Amino acid sequence: MAEIVYMPKLSDTMTEGVVAEWTVKVGDEVASGEILAEIETDKATMEFESFYDGVLLYIGVEKGATAPINSILAIIGDKGEDVDMLLAEAEKATLAPKKEEEVPSPVKEVAQPAAVAAPVSAPVPATVTPLVVADTNGRVFASPLAKKMANEKGINLNNVGGTGQNGRIVKRDIDHYTPYVGASNVKRAFVGTESFTDEPISQMRKTIAKRLAESKFTAPHFYLTIAMDMDNAISARKQINSLEGVKVSFNDMVIKAVALSLREHPNVNSAWLGDVIRRNEHVHIGVAVAVDDGLLVPVVRFADGKDMQQIGSEVRELAMKAKSKKLQPQEWEGNTFTISNLGMFGIEAFTAIVNPPDSCILAVGGISEVPVVKDGQVVPGNVMKVTLSCDHRVVDGATGSMFLNTFKNYMENPVSMLM
């Protein structure tokens, strides 16, 4: 009997997949454990193995096409076996009405037959439409008030650009009109064009949109911002990096300081699970990494037990894997707290959306050289601002504030992180 191979769920957030490549074609012999296809999820491109021995009889999702999980990916069976009846039965089962308790939630995620999936088409530019200000007889389109005002001011409407619907001249155009030399001989019939290109949404971008929208509109966010003196951190980093073979970034220092602070404030290292609040006793730091299609959050596990050099080496390796779509599920799952650092892009301060299942995310800005007051004197200083976004269901203002002050103490006294 032929066996149906369904689109697999290769990550915890995956709802649909794209077939990046088929490694076999219809008619080829397939052995259990052999790679059938490369499937692009919302986070990575992964190899998918066959669970059956036999001949590949049918491909339900062509290369480049998108299909929801549990839709028909392929059929494997004996050579020459008829798959039409099997496909018809599968489609009938999919389209049959379900009992209320069987309907998945949300309904929009119900799997549809992969046979109807089509390759994503190339972006098609929109039709370009010129801005029209006169009809075919040369009559200028203008509102009655605009005509009256133009007549009173002696303005030739042929010289006025219209900003109303379809290029119609309205009151504001007369109010803002400035005559210029030779204007009476110029008839403005064309101002510019409007154009755009629609790009298909990637699996990663769909998942980012869904998860962050759910987080923003489900978890009640509040934000705490604190500034810290980075002079000691700059000096300590310079001394650490003067050692042969050692390379530590400010981001590595931030990760270490956050990890140690979480150990002292376990309530921040928590997650809302609906009927319980999970207090994590381990510290796994998710580090947001920008990639072509959006961002990924690889995880530094047990970060509180690693030194800054170990953290830096691990983050660089994970970032390279993320950018090349080589991350594995165990490398992006399990975070208990997330850090998003945009300081390297010149951003002084920003707020971030909590990354589920975490209850907090720390948005890290860049180091700015600004005037500061020390011992009653205004002197040059280096200041960094961070903003903690909190899920108010789990973390209260006082709890978040105490965590931030502990984090600030570590950053302003980095030697304490080496002890």
Image (cartoon, rainbow, N blue to C red):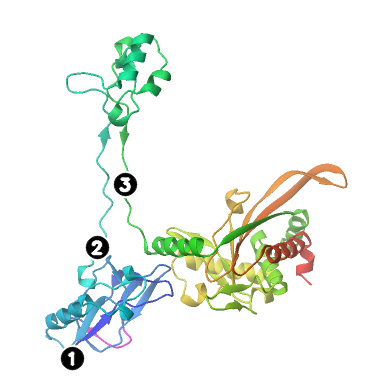
Of mark 3 and mark 1, the one earlier in the sequence is: 1
- Among the 4 quarters of the image, the one containing residue 24: bottom left
Question: Which residues make up the magenta segment?
Answer: 29-34
Residue 364 position within the rendered picture, expressed as x and y whole percent measured from the top left:
63, 57
Q: Secondary structure under badge 2?
A: loop
Evaluate if marks 2 and 1 touch, with contact meaning CB atoms under 8 Å apart: no
Of mark 2 and mark 3, the one earlier in the sequence is: 2
Give the distance between the C-alpha atoms of the residues marked 2 and 3, in whole angstroms.
18 Å
Quarter of the image where the C terminus is located: bottom right
Q: Which mark is residue 197?
A: 3
Evaluate if marks 3 and 1 touch, with contact meaning CB atoms under 8 Å apart: no
Name the amino acid, label 2.
Pro
Quarter of the image where the N terminus is located: bottom left
Whether residue 197 appears in this view of the structure is yes
Give the distance between the C-alpha atoms of the residues marked 3 and 1, in whole angstroms.
47 Å
Residue tagged by mark 1?
Answer: 1
Of mark 2 and mark 1, the one earlier in the sequence is: 1
Q: Residues within 10 Å of mark 2 (few under 14, many from 20)?
A: some
Along the horizontal axis of the image, is 376 left or right of 360?
right
Name the amino acid, label 3.
Thr
Q: Which mark is residue 119?
A: 2
- Among the 4 quarters of the image, the one containing residue 158: top left
Name the amino acid, label 1.
Met
